Image (tube, rainbow, N blue to C red):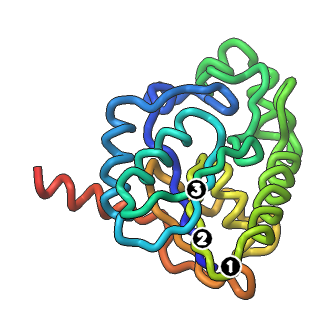
Amino acid sequence: MDLIMVRHGETEDNVKRKMSGWTDTPLSLNGIRQAHIVAQRLKNLPIDRVLSSDLNRAVKTAEIIAQHQSKEIPHEKIMGFREMNFGNLEQLSMQEIEQRHNQEYKKIYTEDKYTFPEGENLNTFHKRVIDTLIAYLHRNRKDENMLIVAHSGTIRCMLTHLVIGNIDGHWRFAVDHCGITVLKNVLEYPYIEKLNDTCHFDYQEGQE
């Protein structure tokens, strides 16, 4: 089984550096453009099933990718693949958190297991994502190729679990908007074929 992971396209919250988390923010016009470009890149790749976070920015990106495929592909929207829940600090930038919630800002950088007020910490977030991923990996056929469209944190959880084997590598992976990561042989000995590949944007810019 091959696993293809794509982060959703850009949102206005991303441009403003606000933490969206579970907030259901839509794609920006540029995010929609990014989704169409990555869809063109993926259109000849064999994909048997699409899984996405159930948040609009991931759902819309996944739908655009599926529209460019030569066959109709099942698409499941999964709450377990949401981004980390930032609780009461959602819709704020780090600068705004520093100004309005200075004690929480300090805790974010000093507490190893910091939990966002009314939200999650890295460990609970990681467990939610990995429990969901394992359930779907074992539910599907071994010869299926799955596309997962989700969020930067969600994809980091999957990468550190499948490649490193624990949570320690979470922050070692860059995950850009509509970047492509491909893991081969996921059920037996996962290895990286592509990591945060965004060369489709370079090609597109060369054509414009």
- SS of the residue under disc 3: loop
Left or right: residue 87 versus residue 50 is right
Left or right: residue 66 versus residue 204 is right
Residue at point 41%, 72% (across, down)? 45
For the residues bearing labels 3 and 2, Cβ distance under 8 angstroms: no
Residue 86 x/y as whole percent? 74, 30
Q: Nearer the viewer, mark 3 or mark 1?
A: 3
Mark linked to residue 97: none
Residue 194 x/y as whole percent? 48, 74
Residue 24 vertical placement versus 109 (above, below): above
- Quarter assignment of residue 147: bottom right
Residue at point 79%, 68% (across, down)? 139
Residue 5 vertical placement versus 194 (above, below): above
Mark linked to residue 3: 2
Three-letter amino acid code at disc 3?
Pro
Q: Residue furthest top?
A: 100
Mark linked to residue 74: 3
